[in-house]
Image (tube, helix red, strand yellow):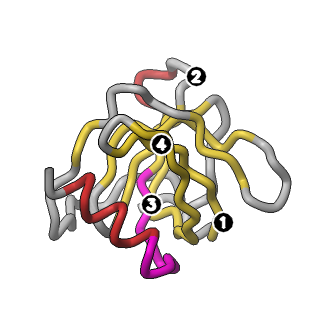
Amino acid sequence: MNANTRPADQRSKPRVTIPEHPQVVDTHSGAVIGQLVNLSSDGLMLAGSRPIERNCVCQMRIPLMVNGRSTEIKIGAECLWCEDTNGSGTHWSGFQIIDIGSEDQAILDRITEA
């Protein structure tokens, strides 16, 4: 398997599609990493214009809507796979959350259990 190939689906929890597709930002640089496509209590998928290296750890800020209110969670996540489907120029990346505060985890759980 090359560095940009998606492994077999190993999700243990269902993902929720995020219709707003908010921009996810690198906490350190302020650069946009990609747009949030879906998330679960322990992972997420982004779509972006640039590939993300497998095993890369990113610190992210993710804006979300919870009960009609805008909020933001901060996470650390490891990229498990990245692919450019059909050479479209859109790079889809799957992440596993490896670091999240208890308050942000509670927000994430609320969204994914709704």
Within-10-Å neighbours for mark 3: few <14, some 14–19, many 20+: many
Residue carrying label 3: 95
Horizontal arrangement in the rendering, residue 53 relative to residue 105 (left or right): right
| 39 vs 88: above or below | below
Q: Is residue 83 visible?
A: no
Please tell me the numbered disc located at residue 59: 1
Q: What amino acid is labelled 2 in the image?
A: Gly
Q: What separation in Å lies between label 3 and label 2 (alpha carbons)?
A: 19 Å
Mark 3 or mark 2, which is nearer to you? 3
**What number is the disc on residue 46?**
4
Give the mark, 4 or 1, whose residue is nearer the N terminus.
4
Q: Residue beneath label 2, please? A: 89
Query: Which amino acid is tagged 1?
Result: Gln
Q: Residues within 10 Å of mark 1 (few under 14, many from 20)?
A: many
SS under mark 2: loop
Among numbered discs 3 and 4, the one appearing first in the sequence: 4
* Residues marked 4 and 1 touching at CB (< 8 Å): no
